Image (spheres, rainbow, N blue to C red):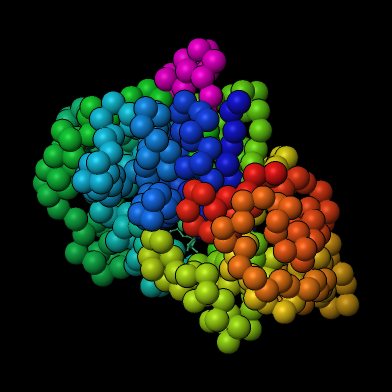
Amino acid sequence: MNIVIVGVQWGDEGKGKIIDILSEKVDVVVRYQGGNNAGHTVVVDGNEYIFHLIPSGILHKGKICCIGNGVVVDPQVLLKEIEGLQDAGFTAKGRLKISTLAHLILPYHRILDQLREMKRAHKIGTTNRGIGPCYADKINRCGIRMVDLLNRSVFADKLKDNLREKNEIFRKVYNHPGFDFKKIYCEYMEYAKRLSGYIANTALFLNEALRQKKDILFEGAQGTFLDIDFGTYPFVTSSSTISGGAAIGTGVSPEKIDKVLGVAKAYTTRVGEGPFPTEYPRRFGNFMREKGAEFGATTGRPRRCGWFDAVMVKEAVMLNGISELAIMKLDILDGLKSIKICVAYKYKGKVFRDFPHDTTVLRNAAPVYKEVPGWQGPVTGIGAFGRLPANARSYLKRLQDLLGVKISIVSVGSGRQDTIFL
Ligand code: IMO
Ligand code: MG
């Protein structure tokens, strides 16, 4: 079965853990969008691994991991990640394939990301990894791809062309000295040497795998509300994070995808700026952040925390075609007297039951909550749904009813074993 895993909130839902678990049942895991703005955490035997570019399936020996054409790749970060894996006793050789068509992040993308953010009146709070500028060049048809790394003269030509225009912009608009051709050229040719063995036609590889009846897991990064089209624009990332992105970002036809599994936290978090209707009041927010260790896996920034927003997740269920949902970090809600679920928004006397596209509405809307009783005892270590405290079960049932989708996985701790399958 070919499954797409997508985040249904603003990222950091716990996709890494689900992908790690499901990887065991598939042959290939592929990332289809985003770049090293992602931070996917996997805990195995008490050891924590954080992946930014390499699919979270890499910890399962014998599985092939692909970085699809829809991903933007910072080669320096990728090489570091490969080395980190080797140090931990895992090998990427022969198991990692990077699409020839994936776009490269260059030093000017990272700097432009920072400079633009500094100039913005309404900051996005990007990860400063150069993601937006790299995708912009892709769409602008001046991007440089993995395949170009393999051809010195093509790479040199494209880099020169880019620097001619970009250096002028850096100097005139941003008062920045610009970039030296030779320095970038030499640096990237060194990366080319070290990465050439991994670069491949992944679309061809994936389709051949499907022909041989192999199973593929598509690893989404970020979340539905960071999607370039359907997210809380402009406070979004620059790629198609929804399940549809899996086809575009890999070259596998949507016809081949069997199922979409959504991943949601039992509450909501967001890193960076932008509207967040169910955000907790400050003091409670600080308390929950500490309790849930809600700090960015990529930038270390404190995550904003809030109640579960069923309006949002219902929209995500529709946009992604989700048939099953995983609810993560249920244990963080242990010990609360009561728990709120947002079922609608109210703005200027009007009730919104569907996710509004008008940012003004979203920014100023008052959430309409249903309140349910909490539970006391810790849920970590509980291995079956039936043994969860009654109130935890009714919280999950309530979510299921509100969203109209089956909850098939509940996570009650960070380890692989702290997972309930329904
Ligand atoms: P994972 O895959 C949470 C957010 C940034 C910022 C916005 C744009 O771990 O869920 P960008 O650098 O992409 O241009 O930043 O998107 N963002 C994420 N938030 N989880 C992520 O990835 C994110 N990737 C980007 O904080 O608000
Ligand atoms: Mg993350």
Asked if residue 16 lies left or right of residue 90, the reply is right
Whether residue 146 appears in this view of the structure is: yes
- Residue 368, percent from left and from top: 81, 73
Label count reads 0
Farthest residue toward the bottom? 283
In the rendered view, tell whether residue 412 sits above or below residue 211: below
Residue pictured at 51% horizontal, 28% vertical:
26
- Residue 76, percent from left and from top: 24, 48
* 112 in the magenta segment: no
- Residue 50, percent from left and from top: 37, 53
| 149 or 206, nearer to the observer | 206
Asked if residue 311 lies left or right of residue 77, the reply is right
**Which is the main secondary structure of the residues drawn in magenta?**
helix
Residue pictured at 80% horizontal, 71% vertical:
372
| Quarter containing the C terminus | top right
Whether residue 310 appears in this view of the structure is: no
Look at the image and give the residue range highlighted in magenta: 203-216
Residue pictured at 23% horizontal, 27% vertical:
197
- Residue 311, percent from left and from top: 76, 60
| Quarter containing the N terminus | top right
